[in-house]
Image (tube, grey):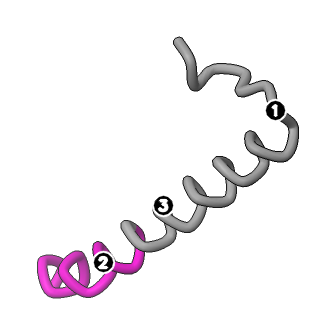
């Protein structure tokens, strides 16, 4: 049961991570100074 749930949720979590990453990139482009991305 748990493995089935993880298979169900993993794509959603990864998609959410991609959305958050894209939003962070947009914020960086707007602000013009990435705080930690150029490390």
Image coordinates for residue 20, horizontal then vertical, percent: 60, 59
* Of marks 1 and 3, the one in the foreground: 1
Asked if the stretch drawn in magenta spans residue 7, the answer is yes
Residue 32, compared with residue 10, is above or below; it is above
Q: Nearer the viewer, residue 5 or 20?
A: 20
Count residues near mark 2 (Cα–Cα under 10 Å), then give few for <14, some for 14-19, many for 20+: few
Q: What residue is shown with label 3?
A: 17
Marks 1 and 3, Cα distance to the nearest angstrom? Answer: 22 Å
What residue appears at the point 56 percent right and 67 percent down from the top-left corner?
A: 19
Residue 18, compared with residue 1, is above or below; it is above
Q: What residue is shown with label 2?
A: 11
Residue 7, compared with residue 34, is above or below; it is below
Q: What residue is shown with label 1?
A: 32
What residue appears at the point 79 percent right and 25 percent down from the top-left corner?
A: 33
What residue appears at the point 81 percent right and 32 percent down from the top-left corner?
A: 32
Total numbered circles: 3
Mark 1 vs 3, N-terminal side: 3
Count residues near mark 1 (Cα–Cα under 10 Å), then give few for <14, some for 14-19, many for 20+: few
Question: Which residue appears farthest toward the right when viewing the image?
Answer: 31
What residue appears at the point 26 percent right and 87 percent down from the top-left corner?
A: 8
Mark 1 vs 2, N-terminal side: 2
Image coordinates for residue 16, horizontal then vertical, percent: 50, 70
Residue 11, compared with residue 30, is above or below; it is below
Q: Which residues are magenta?
A: 1-13
Assess whether mark 3 and mark 1 are in contact (beta carbons under 8 angstroms): no
The N terminus: image quadrant? bottom left
Q: Which image quadrant for residue 9? A: bottom left
Q: Which image quadrant for residue 13? A: bottom left
Q: Secondary structure at mark 3?
A: helix
Image coordinates for residue 10, horizontal then vertical, percent: 29, 73
Q: Secondary structure at mark 2?
A: helix
Marks 1 and 2, Cα distance to the nearest angstrom? Answer: 31 Å
């Amino acid at each position: 049961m748990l493995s089935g749930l993880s298979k169900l949720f993993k794509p959603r979590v990864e998609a959410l991570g991609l959305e958050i990453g894209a939003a962070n990139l947009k914020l960086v482009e707007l602000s013009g100074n990435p705080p930690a991305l150029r490390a």
